[in-house]
Amino acid sequence: MSELRQEQRPSPAMLVVRGPNAEAAQRLMDRHARSFAPAARFMPRHERDDIARLYAICRTADDLADEAPPEIGRRRLDAIRADLYNDSTRDRIAFEAQSLFSDAPHGLDAFGRLLDGLRRDLDPLCLKDDAELDGYADAVAGTVGEMICALFDIPTAHRPEAIALGRAMQFTNIARDVREDAVRGRRYLPATRCPATPDAIAGREPAAVEAAAVATRALLDRADGFYRDGRAGLIALPLRLRLAVAVAARLYQGIGSVIRRQHANPHAPRAVVPLGQKIRLALTGIADALFARWHSRAR
């Protein structure tokens, strides 16, 4: 981390993970994960600490892809990836990942795939079709579902539902950040649905804005299907983790309803779920958790 601090002013996430530091990780999650952090309060303290530590290393890696100059981000992500299986690593992020997944090597493998997916963000990225989008979303978000399964020893049979939920949340992220991504030279909306260039979207060209809006609505429709698939796996989770995941999923899905009300215009104000709606969504999430068997049977 020292070279990064010398070369740019680091984001809060980059300063937090310096070995197993659950309190600092919890503060980071409280500050940035506004959908998941409140839901995580359902969990016992030791489990919430593990989730916060996982959030911190994922957030730090994501910041390297989004906030660091490309050469610095590329070098740091490559260094973490190269040291991930090194027993004598001195890299703080690799060490923290090893500590988290000391008894679950498949969780460490999933973190490695997350790093590979984030590395793609360091180059101008315009996805071609739904299949490429799905692969990207699975790499940067489905892997988080896999890591949570690894932390809590969830049976392998239920990992596809965890990956589906991660994919749904990533689709929501993409739908919310179309303009911001276009400014960075990225377009995650598939070209088969939105052929407009990032420059055209960022420049508010009418045809490009309309194409992005149509593609965003289609993306949210696909996300809704993956949220349903993800809920089918809630039954496999311990009750308190199930409550946290179910509430977080409903809150995140609620962002999509705000985007729809804004007609999916990429230049609308950033989608924020109002407090009253958050309360209703949280109650719906609690019901999802309590009636998880119904979701499994319905699927």
Image: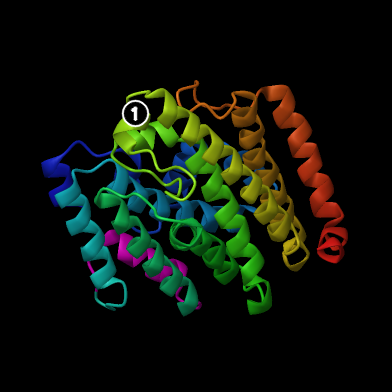
**Above or below for 133 versus 218:** below
> Does the segment drawn in magenta span residue 288?
no
**Above or below for 215 versus 295:** above
Where residue 197 appears, as percent x and y from the top left, is 33, 39
Give the labeled residue for mark 1.
202
Q: In this view, does 185 lie to the left or right of 220?
A: left
Q: Residue, x 54% and y 47% (percent of image)?
A: 171
Callout 1 amino acid: Ala
Q: Provide the residue span drawn in magenta.
A: 89-104
Where residue 66 appears, as percent x and y from the top left, is 31, 43
Quarter assignment of residue 38: top right
Residue 123 seen by the camera: yes
Where residue 140 appears, as percent x and y from the top left, is 44, 57
Quarter assignment of residue 116: bottom left
Residue 43 seen by the camera: no
Quarter assignment of residue 293: bottom right
